[in-house]
Amino acid sequence: MARLVYPFFGSRPIETINRSDIVRLLDRIEDERGPVMANRTLGIIGRIMSFHASRSDDFRSPIVKGMAKPEQARARVLSDDELRAIWKATIEYEVAAFGAFLRFVLLTATRRNEAGHMHWTELDGKDWVIPASRYKTNHDHLIPLSALALEMLPERQSGEFVFGRRGGHQPAGSYDYHKAIIDEASGVKGWVLHDLRRTARSLLSRAGVASDHAERCLGHVIGGVRGIYDRHEYYDEKTKAFEALATLVQRIIDPQQNVNVVEMKR
């Protein structure tokens, strides 16, 4: 509740929270943390709403049957044609640097808030270190940025957030609003931002990156690895992997430019 619900609703009175507000929150949680977490959050909110309704003559809970999320795991990987269409749409849509933000998420295989809350202080040359305090595994995650990913970074503003709003003083937001415009322009429907991370993982394999190196690019904890975590582990391998990802993405978005390039075999 403290990390997911309170920041979203703030100090709003419970009577002002309507069904569409809760749906937007659940969609956001599903995108970032999966349907199971969204349903757990819905259950907690439902109990609070029911408790308040039991003590009020006028309040009626906005939660109804059917709001729970289907809990099967998503497996959406964008096709080359879909990637091409989305990439083109992001080039043409640079409001709030959202187009560059989407391309950056794909090229770094990150979650939307990891990139959306990125601080300039987390950059050291071409290296981006997501601190443990805001990374899912509670470990620092180092990403050697490819040359193409570095091109996506906007000009530095006065604020602390790289892809931030209001001069960089607030983290990126309004994802649903901006993405709806990208959907309309690209003609690609039925995808969420987290599918970019899943697609990046698929492309890493397609580019010939070894599975354990690709998993480290995504910041996954590998079973059997020693307990002491070194964020610089596999730095060279990750550097090559992210460059391979960028090269493959470039081939996909502009196939005529790289007609003589042959995919690596595993």
Image: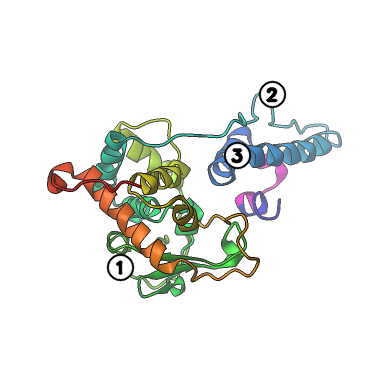
Tell me, yes or no, whether the highlighted magenta stretch contains residue 5.
no
Element type at mark 2:
loop
When asked about the image quadrant of residue 259, the answer is: top left
Classify 132 as above or below 187. below
Residue at the spot x=62%, y=54% of the render?
7
Residues at marks 2 and 3, CA–CA distance in whole angstroms: 14 Å
Residues at marks 1 and 3, CA–CA distance in whole angstroms: 33 Å
Residues at marks 2 and 1, CA–CA distance in whole angstroms: 47 Å
Residue type marked 3: Leu
Task: Pick whichever of labels 1 and 3 is earlier in the sequence.
Answer: 3
Residue type marked 2: Lys
Q: Which mark is residue 65?
A: 2
- Location of mark 1 (residue): 155
Residue at the spot x=61%, y=37% of the render?
35
Q: Which residues are magenta?
A: 8-17
Dot 1 surroundings within 10 Å: few (below 14), some, or many (20 or more)?
few
Task: Pick whichever of labels 2 and 1 is earlier in the sequence.
Answer: 2
Kindly tell me whether residue 128 is visible in this rendering: yes
| Left or right: where 43 falls relative to 134 | right
On the image, the x and y values in percent for residue 181 come to 34, 39
Dot 3 surroundings within 10 Å: few (below 14), some, or many (20 or more)?
many
Task: Pick whichever of labels 2 and 3 is earlier in the sequence.
Answer: 3
